[in-house]
Image (cartoon, rainbow, N blue to C red):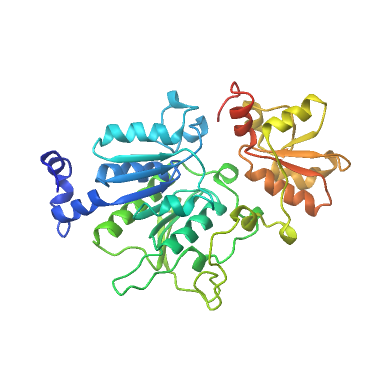
Amino acid sequence: MLNKEELIRYNRQIILPDFGVEGQEKLKKASVLVIGAGGLGAPNLMYLAAAGIGRIGIIDFDEVSLSNLHRQVLFKTSEIGQSKAEVAKGRLSELNPTIDFVTFNSPITSSNALDIINDYDVVVDGSDNLPTRYLVNDACFFLGKPLVYGAIFRFEGQVSVFNLIDEKGLKGPNYRDLFPTPPPPELVPSCTEGGVIGVLPGIIGSMQANEVIKVVTGIGETLTGRLFLFDALDMTSRTLNVKHQPSNPLTGDHPELTELIDYEAFCSGSDEGRQIVEISPRTLMEKMAKGSPFILDVREDYEYEISNIGGVLIPLNQLNDRLGEIPNNEEVVVMCKTGGRSKKAIDLLFKSGFKDLVNLKGGILAWRHEIDPTLKVY
């Protein structure tokens, strides 16, 4: 039941036709897990908390950085270097102290996804990488949880609702009906590499929050079975139908997946299932003390200027043209900001004949966390 304060707080929603006190009480009883407190997660969290979702889980193991602030409006400059999940919880508790917030300051993985997601009614995907996207989709499918999907890149965004069970008990399409398998990593640049206009995640994230409210309350028509596409440059949109595909390894003619897998390996695009060797910041520091190995930094020039550990800078998009600058007779440790671009670089180098390649696990952010906290966050 809603108390007097809640009746006042949510009055503008309660007076809506077909919403009423019943709709608000459904929101209060609902639990929603938001994966990522970044560009998409921030508007989702703000509007879901304001709308009165009873319990909200926040998964994000990253820290607030300067380059976040043009789009992640949940955070302030004074909070750079602090935990996104904890800062978000504090800010949202001020917005609506009636909400129960649960934070997870660690990545969602194949080993913990089912346990975490099982405790929530609806999941919001605010992630920015393919391994997490496939992992979350598959976990939601196995648990029968609706998933509100969103993605952004440069000036374009998309929204849909996956795994939603209709009134007939039929489960709607999921992410693998769009993309049964991931494209090659080099064809999927992240926002770090390709950029994103700051207002776009606010628009797409708000649309996701709207879908969550519809899923929980049952009002309107959700985007299940449809993919909404938005272009911020020319302000156009279109909606594509999404249908169950025979090639879907979860639900197709020959379903192959019955449990969660290693999604990093699945999305790596490495030849013949090759596993990329990783090194921890501490182990790398010990090797550096002995005068080795060669460190290849594949970030952009401006990132290197902000903080670096003395590696040789060759941005990922220049790598093909500068292979001659990299030794092929010694160990090469490849690094970037978080470890994603460096994996793409290693795959490219393997295909170019390089052999002794190692990825710095967690990139320079992990180095800052484990070795040198004086490095600037960006």
Q: Residue furthest top?
A: 374
Q: Position of residue 215 (x, y in %)?
A: 30, 59
Instruction: Report which quarter residue 268 is drawn in.
Output: bottom right
> Relative to residue 241, is residue 195 drawn left or right?
right
Q: Residue at x 28, y 54 (%)?
A: 213
Q: Quadrant of the C terminus?
A: top right
> Relative to residue 282, is residue 103 drawn left or right?
left
> Relative to residue 253, is residue 21 drawn left or right?
left
Q: Residue at x 57, y 47 (%)?
A: 190
Figure check: 287 above or below 346: above
Residue 16 visible to the viewer: no
Residue 163 visible to the viewer: yes
Q: Residue furthest right?
A: 329
**Which residue is at the front of the view, 43 or 111?**
111
Q: Position of residue 23 (x, y in %)?
A: 19, 55
Q: Residue at x 39, y 53 (%)?
A: 123
Figure check: 174 above or below 96: below
Q: Position of residue 154 (x, y in %)?
A: 52, 48
Q: Residue at x 63, y 45 (%)?
A: 340
For the image shown, how many numbered marks are present on the structure? Answer: 0
Q: Position of residue 21 (x, y in %)?
A: 14, 52
